[in-house]
Structures are given as C-alpha cells and as structure tokens.
Amino acid sequence: MKNVSNRLNRLSESATLAMARMSRELQAKGIDVIALSLGEPDFNTPEFIKEAGKKAIDDNFSHYTPVPGLTELRSSISAKFKRDNNLEYKPEQIVTSTGAKQSLANVCLSLLNPGDEVLLPCPYWVSYSEIIKLAEGTPIEIPSSIDSDFKVTADDLERAITSKTKMLMFSSPCNPSGTVYSQEELEDIAKMLEKYPEIFVVSDEIYEHINFTEKHFSIGSISSMYDRTITVNGVSKGFAMTGWRVGFIGAPLWIAKACNKIQGQVTSATCAIAQKATERAMLAEPKSATKEMKETFLKRRNMLVNELKNIKGIKCNIPNGAFYVFPEISYFFGKSYAETLIKNANDLCMYLLNNAHVACVAGDAFGNPECIRISYAASELKLIEAMKRIKKYLELLK
C-alpha cells in the first residue's frame, strides 16, 4: 500500500476477520451464508452480568479509571486466579485491557526486542504471529498434526530453542484445534524449560471455561514457572461477553508494570462500565455460570465430529475444548469441480463459501495449511444445514 509504514506492510489481515468480511458481502447480496468463521459464542451475556453493567451506568461509572483497571476489579480477578487456577497474583500484578488481544500485544511490546524468537506450537491463534511481528519479534512455528492431537512435546519445543529464543506462546484449550494440554504434559514442558530460565511463557487461557476434560490446568501454577509466566484470560468466550472488550493478565510485578506503561500510552483503561460487569462475572461460580453454554457446545461438537467423519477424505480429531473443529482436508488438494481447482486449504474455503455458502477459515493462518477451522458457535439447525452443504459440495470434487 502506498505511503504506509513498513510495519503495516509486514502484517497480514486477520484471516478470520477477512472471511467474516467476505461472508457479509455475500449476505448483503441476499445470499444465505452460514458463517462458521468467527470465534464468537452465539449466546447472550448472562443476566446477572448485564444487571451489573446497568447498575454501573446508574452509579455513574462513566469516568476514567486507573490504567490497569479499578482496584475492586483487579481484586476480583486476583480471587478468581486463586480459586480457579491456584495462582497467587496480587491486584497490582493484574492489568485489564480492551480484550485479551490487547493483553497479548502489551506483553509482546513489553518483552520483545527486534529479532527475538517466539516459539509458536502449531496450530496457533491467527493473531499471535502478527502481534509478534508488530513487536519486531520472529515467530518460530513448531509443527504438529492431527495424528498427535495437534499437540507438541517438550522435545519438539527444545529442538527449536536457540540463543535468540525469548518466549513460548500457546493457548489451552487451543484456538483453532480445541486441544487441551493435560497437567502432566505441561509439567513435562515446564521441566524442560527449567534448563532455559531466560525464556518467558505466555499462556492464553481465554477458553478455560469451555473445557470438556475433567479440569483446566495453568502452567503458571507450577512453582518453577510462576516467575516467568504471563497468564492471559478474559470474559469474551466463557461468559459470552465479546462486545464488552475486557481481557486481563496475571504476571510478575515488573511485567505488569511494563504492560501498564505500554497501555497508558495507547488506550489507557478499558471501559469503566465493562469493568464493573467483569467484576461481577469474576465473583460468579464459573461452573454454574457457564454450565448451559458448555453443555450446548459439547452437544454441538459431538454432532459436528460425527457428521465430518461421514465425509470421505476428511480426518477429524475430537477437540476437548473451545468451540472449533480443525479437520485435515488435504485429500481434496488437486481435485476440481467445474472450473475450480483446489490447490490448498484457502481454495477449499473459497470454494465452500462461493458454492455451499458456508464460511470457514483456512488453516494456513493458524500454522497448519492442510486443515480448515469450523466454528460451532452457531445453532444446531444451522450446523446441520452447513454440514449438508459441505458434504454435497465436497462430494462433487473429483
């Protein structure tokens, strides 16, 4: 683009937002597109949280707050970390931001210097690599496959470590694969990292409450990891609060202060009203507050996985969290229908969008180009119809 910065030219457009934009363009033409590309719960924010937001308006929470958030909010997040994650973060170790995406950007801008390497187990959320680039770091992809349930091991990570490695960034439950790392697996990684005390860990736990395993485990709760782990979370997914825009970190005090400094020059504090609503969410017992949504997502997952397994050429693991499936679709590469030749996952997604009118996201942006991401944050009726369309048009590829 003419006259824009080199920094901007290094960045790619978010693949999920790009597909959402193309879906809206077709919908504007009157085409019935089933959008399964965005990671947004199709639930409304729970009433008790909305009431807290309304009360905040009535109580005139309409002024600037401290950059890292209201003290009472950070105290409630501190209590949540202790209750749910066995993490001891004092309120001053917590920074709330305008979404967990800003939290991640704050961390990278605070810690990375030009050329610093960040280990990214594949698949990873699309914005990780771009945020790292924005901070002038270098993303280092650690491959995985559907055969390993999209997990990497401590040995896989160690082979990629160099003198430039500064950080490991991952999510569990994972967007896009739904993979959940067990306590034992994270302890193995932590034991390996004990040999490399200069490497920081960014643990993105935004899908913590959409976890179909017995429990969620935070790597920061391992004693050797506490002083080098930044735990990232928020309310957008588990509490269906995407539009409220609140994320947060718990971190060593010096890192929290660094993120506070960065944020103070970019946005300052997030919305005061959203902060009060989040405070109420943090005080809730998560199992009861998120029970219905989690059960609904589990039912949808089971249905979607069963449907995908009945389509020739698709390989699908069983995701244990979040609300995505990440099927391997390389069987269709080289096949065609009419004038359309499928060379890669992006071609397949565009084929499905333009013919089946179902929006998915190509796996390239997540580090696994042989896969596509399908969100099941949509009604069961829409998912059933989407699977019918996908099956029909994939079977036409020869």
Image: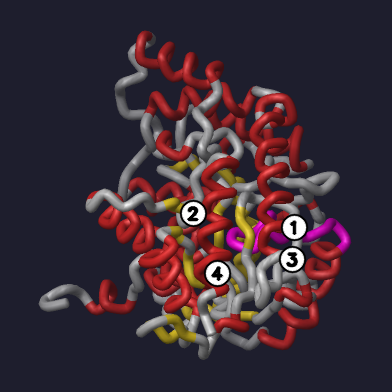
**Mark toward the start of the polypeptide (4 vs 2):** 2
User: Relative to 124, is 381 above or below?
Assistant: above
Residue receiving disc 2: 36
Q: Position of residue 147 (x, y in %)?
A: 77, 77
Residue closest to the eye, 318 or 291: 318
Residue receiving disc 1: 180
For badge 3, the amino acid type reads Asn
What separation in Å lies between label 1 and label 4 (alpha carbons)? 18 Å
User: Disc 3 on helix, strand or loop?
Assistant: loop
Q: What secondary structure prevails in the magenta region? A: loop
Front tag of 1 and 4: 4
Residue receiving disc 4: 372
For badge 4, the amino acid type reads Ile
Q: Position of residue 365 (x, y in %)?
A: 48, 72
What separation in Å lies between label 3 and label 4 (alpha carbons)? 13 Å
Q: Position of residue 171 (x, y in %)?
A: 64, 59
Picture quarter with the N terminus: bottom left
Residue 83: quadrant of the picture: top right
User: Relative to 156, is 102 above or below?
Assistant: above
Farthest bottom residue in view = 334
For badge 1, the amino acid type reads Val
Badge count: 4
